[in-house]
Image (cartoon, grey):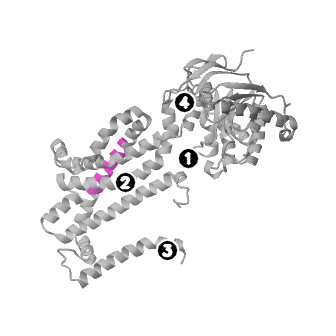
């Protein structure tokens, strides 16, 4: 079975990089359809570059990136993205922010005006799923950071993307809100059957949410370890307090420490 | 009295106080009305020349608004182009700055060569003097779209045009309306300069004729009319700014 996202022997140097050092080098990574993959690594290891390569925002200098059976040569159009910063547009209500991708992506773009009610209903059901029922009329700046991040997840999912890229989406939140959002993310993944690539610094987050964890080395980034996570789904937050979970986090910690030392 | 009421009252108290002090000084120091007329004398002159002043003021108002309208249209357009293309921005910036540094009063003779004396030079001067701040502000607003926001949209297949119109332009609106307050004042300066040098009507022209004839109270009356018109136009743009971009003014500072 061929992988949904297949990054094969990719080396990438940014045109603007002053030292000419590659951001990632000989990077290999395979994620299956519907899988929840997490990428962890020391800061500056090229995790964000990986995101840009997989969504077609950057093209690799060497190697190939294949998403959904096609080599990526332009922005992939089937991806949703969410970042640490929720980047909501302050002049739109939360609901209109969530509908924004539909104004861009076909076939929704040409259908949006005539089928507005249908799309609004969909956005509202997503809002309910992330625990923001009835908050769509508020402006994003009237919501707390955690609530904005929930809305940002809705925006990333509204056009039913096949691939969801999350770049440290919970990094700026306090630990209670973060754990709440882990559960939101877990349920969204179970409900939508979307392939997710999560970039994170938080090893517990990676271990709790994902099916497969990739550890990256420091710049130039490579995958130094790949680890399947076998905890059965649906997972409860309680598993984060089991010895098996601690052992896994400890093991990942070891990989990261090695990766840092190698740099 | 509450601080809020005090703040609301302060502009009136200070304005009235300023003119009262002026009036008193003129009388106690016995300043000749040729040098500095008292406010009461000026007010009397405003009343005396009211027909003439209204006629010329309306003309100036039209010149200003026409020039300002052109500047808004052109400024938005050019700002959008400069904001969305780094190449054009870098290429044209020196030209724009160079053009903007020319005192516009020096351009009026050229406008007269081209268009003759009449309504065109004041409108053109108002336009030329006021479009620059609009261009710079709109371009800045568009060029500073968060890269993450751009990534979100580009990953969906958004074109440059989509990004400029969906995010860049709305985002630039607070900058745009901020610049309008500057631009309207400048347009006003431009139209008066144009009228002084190349028109047979308008407050600017009235000023030139009145000062040539040493009609000092009329000169002062014209100045007062100019000030009042300026404040009104500024207030209208400030009101437009508040009602159009309320989302941008949510901080404690703006309250």
Q: Is residue A150 above or below residue B57?
A: above
Q: Earlier in the sequence, mark 2 or mark 4?
A: 4
Judged from this view, the residue extending furthest toward the left is B213
The chain letter for the residue carrying disc 3 is: B
Q: Nearer the viewer, residue B76 or B42?
A: B76
**Percent from the top left, x then y, of residue B37?**
22, 75
Q: Earlier in the sequence, mark 3 or mark 2?
A: 3
Please report the residue visible at 18 percent of the width from the left and 51 percent of the height from the top. B198
Q: CA distance from mark 1 to mark 4?
A: 19 Å
Q: Residues within 10 Å of mark 1 (few under 14, many from 20)?
A: some
Q: Is residue A31 above or below residue B25?
A: above
Query: Which residue, given by chain and number where applicable, does mark 2 sit on?
Result: B182
Disc 1 secondary structure class: loop
The chain letter for the residue carrying disc 1 is: A
Query: Which residue, given by chain and number where applicable, does mark 4 sit on?
Result: B158
Judged from this view, the residue extending furthest toward the front is A261
Q: CA distance from mark 2 to mark 4?
A: 34 Å
Q: CA distance from mark 3 to mark 2?
A: 27 Å
Disc 3 secondary structure class: helix
The chain letter for the residue carrying disc 2 is: B
Judged from this view, the residue extending furthest toward the top is A1
Q: CA distance from mark 3 to mark 4?
A: 51 Å
Same chain under badges 3 and 2? The reply is: yes
* Residues drawn in magenta: B59-74
Q: Is residue A77 above or below residue A98?
A: above
């Amino acid at each position: 079975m061929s992988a949904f996202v297949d990054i094969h022997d990719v080396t990438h140097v940014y045109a603007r990089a002053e030292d000419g050092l590659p951001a990632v080098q000989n990077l290999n990574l395979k994620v299956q359809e519907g899988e929840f993959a997490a990428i962890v690594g020391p800061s500056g290891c090229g995790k964000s570059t990986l995101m840009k390569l997989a969504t077609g925002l950057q093209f690799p200098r060497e190697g190939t990136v294949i998403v959904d059976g096609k080599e990526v040569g332009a922005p992939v159009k089937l991806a949703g993205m969410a970042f640490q910063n929720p980047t909501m547009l302050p002049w739109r209500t939360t609901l209109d922010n969530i509908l924004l991708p539909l104004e861009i992506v076909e076939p929704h773009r040409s259908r949006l005006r005539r089928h507005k009610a249908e799309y609004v209903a969909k956005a509202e059901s997503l809002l309910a799923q992330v625990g923001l029922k009835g908050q769509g009329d508020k402006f994003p700046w009237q919501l707390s950071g955690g609530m904005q991040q929930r809305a940002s997840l809705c925006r990333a999912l509204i056009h039913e993307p096949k691939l969801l890229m999350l770049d440290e989406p919970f990094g700026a939140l306090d630990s209670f809100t973060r754990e709440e959002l882990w559960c939101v993310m877990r349920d969204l993944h179970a409900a939508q059957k979307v392939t997710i690539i999560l970039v994170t610094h938080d090893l517990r987050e990676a271990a709790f949410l994902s099916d497969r964890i990739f550890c990256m080395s420091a710049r130039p980034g490579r995958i130094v370890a790949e680890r399947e996570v076998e905890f059965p789904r649906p997972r409860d937050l309680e598993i984060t307090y089991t010895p098996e979970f601690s052992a896994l986090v400890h093991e990942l910690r070891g990989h990261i420490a090695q990766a840092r030392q190698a740099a | 009295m509450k601080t809020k009421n005090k703040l609301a009252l302060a502009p009136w108290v200070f304005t009235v106080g300023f003119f009262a002090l002026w009036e008193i000084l003129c009388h106690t120091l016995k300043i000749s009305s040729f040098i500095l007329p008292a406010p009461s004398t000026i007010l009397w002159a405003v009343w005396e020349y009211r027909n003439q002043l209204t006629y010329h003021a309306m003309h100036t108002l039209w010149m200003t608004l026409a020039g300002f309208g052109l500047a808004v249209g052109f400024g938005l357009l050019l700002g959008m182009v400069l904001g969305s293309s780094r190449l054009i921005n870098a290429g044209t910036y020196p030209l724009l700055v160079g053009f903007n540094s020319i005192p516009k009063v020096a351009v009026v003779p050229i406008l007269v060569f081209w268009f003759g004396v009449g309504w065109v030079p004041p409108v053109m001067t108002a336009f030329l003097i006021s479009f620059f701040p609009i261009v710079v502000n709109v371009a800045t607003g568009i060029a500073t779209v968060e890269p993450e926001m751009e990534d979100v949209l580009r990953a969906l297949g958004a074109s440059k045009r989509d990004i400029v119109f969906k995010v860049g332009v709305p985002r630039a609106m607070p900058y745009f309306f901020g610049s309008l307050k500057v631009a309207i004042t400048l347009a006003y300066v431009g139209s008066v300069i144009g009228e002084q040098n190349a028109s047979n009507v308008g407050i600017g022209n009235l000023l030139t004729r009145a000062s040539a004839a040493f009609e000092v109270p009329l000169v002062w009356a014209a100045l007062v009319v100019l000030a009042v018109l300026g404040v009104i136009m500024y207030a209208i743009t400030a009101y437009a700014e508040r009602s159009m971009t309320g989302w941008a003014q949510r901080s404690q500072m703006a309250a």
